[in-house]
Amino acid sequence: MRFVWIILITLLSTVANAEESGTFESLKSLIGEWKKEGSESNDFYISFESSASGSVLIENWIYKGKSHSLTVYHQDGKGMIATHFCPQGNQPRLKLTDSGDENAISFIFQDATNLSSIEESHQHSLSFEFVDENTVLRKESYIKSGVETPSVLKLVRR
């Protein structure tokens, strides 16, 4: 009987880990290069690449051939963390939250390094809504002087 319990616990653990990593695997579907829909300029694009044996996803904003900002995604136990390395010099850490939509992945502010006050300008939320395999809505909000400002960027594969 003990052997049956060990097998059952192992199977349930495997299923739980598969569900937990499913969100990260969905996020990794972004790997490649993306541009703003309708843009013909090569001055701006976003690159997603996997690193650290597939345990990290790096989002790199490229502007005029140079890296402008980075966001690094990785699992954190049952959750996921997105650390945004902003050109402003702060590094908000956003934690995975329930988006309420099976086609979306959402993060909300957890804490930050190099940010003296929550009122200072920083990324406060971030989400991806997967329209299809070549189209995604990247939504974010920034807080500046205590006011939250949302923005939406429709991205298509480059």
Image: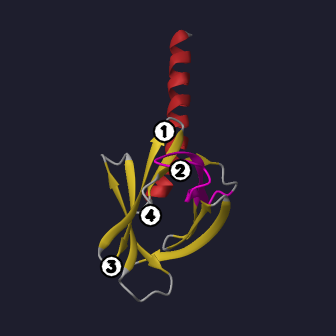
**Residue 81, how many percent across, how many down?**
50, 46
Percent of width and height locating residue 133: 50, 70
Instruction: Pick the residue in front: 42 or 141.
Output: 141
Give the Cα separation between the discs numbered 1 and 4.
20 Å
Dot placed on the residue nearer the N-terminal end, 1 or 2: 2
Which mark identifies residue 36? none
Circle nearer the viewer, 3 or 4: 3
Q: Which residue is mark 2?
A: 23
**Sequence-wise, which precedes: disc 1 or disc 4?**
4
Tag 4 residue: 30
Q: Amino acid at mark 1?
A: Asp
Residue 99 location, x and y as percent? 66, 54
Type of amino acid at the residue the image marks with label 4: Leu
**Mark closest to the chain's N terminus, 1 or 3:** 3
Secondary structure at badge 4 equals loop
In which quadrant of the rendered image does the N terminus lie?
Answer: top right
Q: Identify the residue shown where x is 50% and y is 75%.
A: 155
Q: Position of residue 83 (x, y in %)?
A: 46, 50
Structural distance between the alpha carbons of marks 1 and 2: 12 Å
Number of other residues with Cα within 10 Å of mark 3, as a class: few under 14, some 14 to 19, many 20 or more: few
Q: Earlier in the sequence, mark 2 or mark 3?
A: 2
Instruction: Identify residue type, mark 2.
Output: Thr
Inspect the magenta stretch and tell me whether residue 44 lies in it.
no
**Tag 1's secondary structure?**
strand
**Sequence-first tag of 3 and 4:** 4
The residue pinned by badge 3 equals: 64
Magenta residue span:
101-126
Instruction: Look at 46% across and 48% down and name the residue there.
Output: 114
The residue identified by callout 1 is 76
Mark 3 and mark 4: span between their CA atoms? 21 Å
State the separation of the CA atoms marked 2 and 4: 12 Å
Residue name at image x 48 percent, y 77 percent: 156
